[in-house]
Image: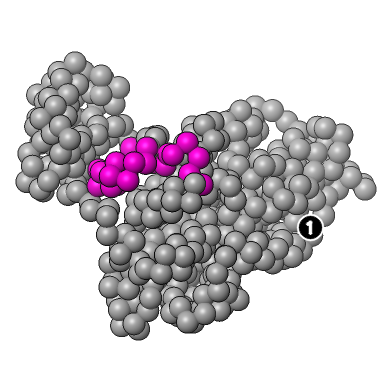
Amino acid sequence: MGKYFGTDGFRGEANKNLTFEHAIKIGRYLGWYYGARQGKKAKIVIGKDTRRSSYMFEYALCTGLMASGADAYIMHVTTTPSVAYITRVDDFDCGIMISASHNPYYDNGIKLLNGSGEKMDEETILLVEDYIDGKVDVPVAERDAIGRTVDYVEGRNRYVGHLISMSKYSFKDCKVGLDVANGAAWQIAKGVFDALGAKTYVMNAEPDGYNINTDCGSTHIEHLQKFVVDNGLDVGFAYDGDADRCLAVDEKGNIVTGDHIMYIYGLYMKERGKLLNNKVVTTVMSNFGLYKALDKVGIEYEKTKVGDKYVYENMVTYGNRIGGEQSGHIIFSKYETTGDGILTSLKLMEVMLAKQKPMSELAAPVVFYPQVLKNVRVKSKPDAQNDPDVQAAVARVAEELGDDGRILVRESGTEPVIRVMVEAGTDEICEQYVDSVIEVIKAKGHMA
């Protein structure tokens, strides 16, 4: 990770940690890097979510891009996966999404995508950061070389058509609930489900610039749980602010997490001979119950670092077809380069209709193990993580848990914190083992 950009873009409170000056500079550098530097005019596409500050950042980025001679194609309010898709299929030099995902309205972010619709490589991001810090300079465009903006709502419409084409079944007679989080999916999701014939019930579809993710969406799924039960719906889907993640609710009001989704669709692929390498790609934070369920049906799995970026890298490197995170970032590499909440919900509908089974039955084999996670503030993450006595304590817990649980100790990517997590048969066992490792960290003098 760089100085400004993390694993999911440059994110911070609008005009505090992430300012309009940052956006202008990002646009200035990208417009030159993909354009004048190569002796051509760059074409760069931009999308945004519904935050009030997203409009400010959109105009700032366009100003920077045009000043460097690039043409900025504006998709307006749209989802992160739509920008990734259009960047790739319409041959843009790169794509930019303005969103802070599931964060509150006062935060925002700038996500950069390469010409293939994938997250920007670290080398290019570091060059952008050098320009932000004034370490390099780029020329401005003059006269007829100055860029322009292009209204590109047609790109969003093309993406909607792409989603509709992904369904093999009509959704007629299906009662579906959608919580669009007052975010980027607020128009797109209902249009897709309506076009496929569903009787669609939508909540939190009145964005005002300040209510994105506020007590709604995938981070507050309890409201969708009640909504599904109260309205007698067959299933419900909840998205986050930029709709790159999806969680579901079954007809009984139970939560269907990303782990459940990977099991449901991974098994469906295996049964049809479509699960290449017979593998599902997870992160280290997937629940032990998922691995137990996959073991029972003979599906193998990979474990990556936390972050859909690492999941996608694994999928590309080894040719795996499905992967994701418990939080609902699910990647179907045959169709997309990033998590896509709406596509995920369409794929779950496909399994329900193909198997003629309710969501509760499809998700039932994944029984979550109790989990306890505690954060320990430390003086030095590497020193605490690599201490021989701490490692011995972790190994001892792992040995005692055997096949009935697991322990994970990892460093926070943003804080001076070590995270100690145990999954086991009961909360009491989890608590006991987590505390035993923390006691060693404390006894060795690592706690801050």
Q: Report the front residue among 418 and 253.
A: 253
145 above or below 436? below
Residue 77: x, y in percent? 61, 65
Residue 20 seen anywhere in this rendered image of the structure: no
Which span of residues is magenta-colored? 274-300
Tell me the kind of residue under disc 1.
Answer: Thr
**260, 182: nearer the viewer:** 260
Residue drawn where x is 38% and y is 64% of the image: 248
Taking the view exactly as shown, the residue that stands out farthest to the top is 388
Residue 293 lies, with reference to residue 400, above or below; the image says below
Q: Would residue 370 be visible to someone looking at this image? A: yes
Name the outermost residue toward the front: 272
SS state under label 1: strand
Q: Position of residue 244 (x, y in %)?
A: 50, 55
x 38%, y 55%: residue:
264
Q: Quadrant of residue 50?
A: bottom right
Q: Is residue 325 left or right of residue 367?
A: right
* Image colouring: one colour
Location of the C terminus (image quadrant): top left
Residue 115 lies in quadrant = top right
